[in-house]
Image: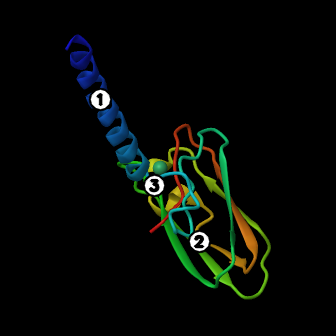
Amino acid sequence: MRSRSMIAPLMSLGIVMIVTMLLGGCGGGGGGGGSSGLELDSGLIASNGGTFAHTFMTVGTFNYHCTVLGHTMTGSVIVQGPSTGDKAVSIVAGAKTKGAAAFDPDPVTVGIGEKVTWANNDSTEHTVTSE
Ligand SMILES: [Cu+2]
């Protein structure tokens, strides 16, 4: 009898752990990049020099924004057929309230197979995330 009363709490603890793992595994989908299906999904780019790079393989206009709560930051990348060379974009100091001026230059134009690298020159983290 005594041993049975010990087992029941352990079993319920085990169930709680399994449920927690399942919820955690499915719920955390933001951030990382790659598996989201978005063209641009940088996750948080470190402040003071963090970078994110992406190579574009499809012609089109790719609008993006920063997903950090309260930030109003938008930009776009235009991908065309002819080569223009890889491009560098700065996330400027104080970017979070600057709208389209948060990314400099904006927009940028690249050719198919060319790369844009964003460098975070601000003192807080930002993202580059497709609309
Ligand atoms: Cu931001």
Residue 54 position, x and y percent, is: 67, 64
Q: Position of residue 43 (x, y in %)?
A: 54, 51
Residue ranking furthest to the bottom:
81
Q: Residue at x 37, y 50 (%)?
A: 27
Q: Which of the pair 62/13 is nearer the observer?
A: 13
Marks 1 and 2 sit apart, C-alpha to C-alpha, by 57 Å
Which residue position is annotated with label 3?
98
Q: Position of residue 109 (x, y in %)?
A: 67, 76
Q: Are dots 1 and 2 in contact, CB under 8 Å?
A: no
Q: Which residue is disc 2 drawn over?
A: 107
For the residue labelled by badge 2, is the local secondary structure a helix, a strand or a loop?
Answer: loop
Q: Residues within 10 Å of mark 3 (few under 14, many from 20)?
A: some
Disc 3 secondary structure class? loop
3D distance between C-alphas at marks 1 and 3:
53 Å
- What residue is at 52 percent from the left and 42 percent from the top? 125
Please state which amino acid type lies under the numbered disc 1: Met
Question: Mark 1 sits on what residue?
Answer: 11
Sequence-wise, which precedes: disc 1 or disc 3? 1
Which quadrant would residue 49 be assigned to in this image?
top right
Dot placed on the residue nearer the N-terminal end, 3 or 2: 3
* Amino acid type indicated by mark 3: Lys
User: Could you classify mark 1 by the number of other residues whose Cα lies within 10 Å: few (under 14), some (14-19), or many (20 or more)?
Assistant: few
Q: Is residue 22 above or below residue 55?
A: above
Q: Position of residue 56 (x, y in %)?
A: 68, 74
